[in-house]
Amino acid sequence: MEQTEKKKSETLNGTRPNGQEGNKRVSVRKTYKLYIDGKFPRSESGRYYALTSPEGEMLANICRSSRKDFRDAVVAARKAQPAWASRSAFNKGQILYRLAEILEGRTAQFTAELVSMGVSESRSKQEIQASIDRLVYYAGWTDKFHQVFSSVNPVESSHFNFSVPEPTGVVSIIAPEENGLLGLVSVIAPAIAGGNTVAVLASSAYPLTAITFAEVVNSSDVPAGVVNILTGYRSELLSWFSNHMDVNAVVYCGSDAEEIRLVGENASLNVKRPVILSPGDWYSPQEENPYRIMELQEVKTTWHPIGQ
């Protein structure tokens, strides 16, 4: 009996009874998928691209999203938008703050992923802290921007005239290439803070943190369909992101003149709003301001008669 227990213990510890080492355990590699409608599907196309570290080490196979994947993301975003817009401003702020809480708790994981993609450890920590702070910043604005940007307008007739911001609807976003996490957070946070839902194309150079951020979204209180994150190449997907007829606004991050021209032309097909963001530094305080929320708002004006 004693001999049997000894053999069992040796086997569990990775050694054979004769003292030789057993097979070493193979680690479970993470599978990076898309995030659509609160689920993690693979691309329907079955395509992927290999992501390697600067040293040439294989990191992961990244899904190459297709037009169909984007259409699925837009359908999910459209379905979720009315309920998300109707949530109280305070509740949306709570949910954004919850995203910041979870992101802070997973700092080590995000740091490891950024470092594996070639970002220095100090810069990785700086990017994560800036992302957390940005979520907290926009969480604070959810119940304030209406007060700042709404107005009671003076008119000559016997009416009250009110102007208030309302969400645009479904927003497609081409996230920045240069900051895989901070750039992503900087474009998602103001869009959803204002009651919009989004379909986002993450950076193809730094995609790992985008899908891990999707896990943060999934484990928070963000309803399914409010945030949808795709990976792939913008050269393949830019035209679909900018010409889809059920998208109300498109946010493009970059400075390529030909891509900006294409976004503008495609946006005109159904008069969706094009928002072009070409900041030199996503860490800049200028990237934290309520006008980022207002870029994706429509101003509704109501006339109410005054009784005599």
Image (cartoon, rainbow, N blue to C red):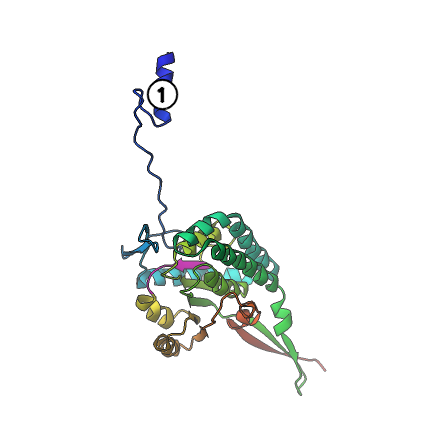
Residue at the spot 64% in from the left edge and 76% down from the top edge = 151
The answer to whether residue 88 of the structure is visible from this angle is no
The answer to whether residue 243 of the structure is visible from this angle is yes
Does 121 sit left or right of 56 as displayed?
right
Q: Is residue 287 magenta?
A: no
Q: Provide the residue designation for mark 1.
A: 8
Q: Nearer the viewer, residue 214 or 143?
A: 214
Q: How many marks?
A: 1
Q: Quadrant of residue 158?
A: bottom right
Helix, strand or loop for disc 1: helix
Q: Which residues are magenta?
A: 227-233
Outermost residue toward the bottom?
156
Quadrant occupied by the N terminus: top left
Residue at the spot 47% in from the left edge and 71% down from the top edge = 280
Does 300 sit left or right of 16 as displayed?
right
- Amino acid at pointer 1: Lys
Vertical relation: 22 (above or below) 124? above
Outermost residue toward the top?
1
Residue at the spot 69% in from the left edge and 80% down from the top edge = 306
Residue 122 pos. (x, y %): 49, 55
Q: Nearer the viewer, residue 83 or 140?
A: 140
Outermost residue toward the right?
308
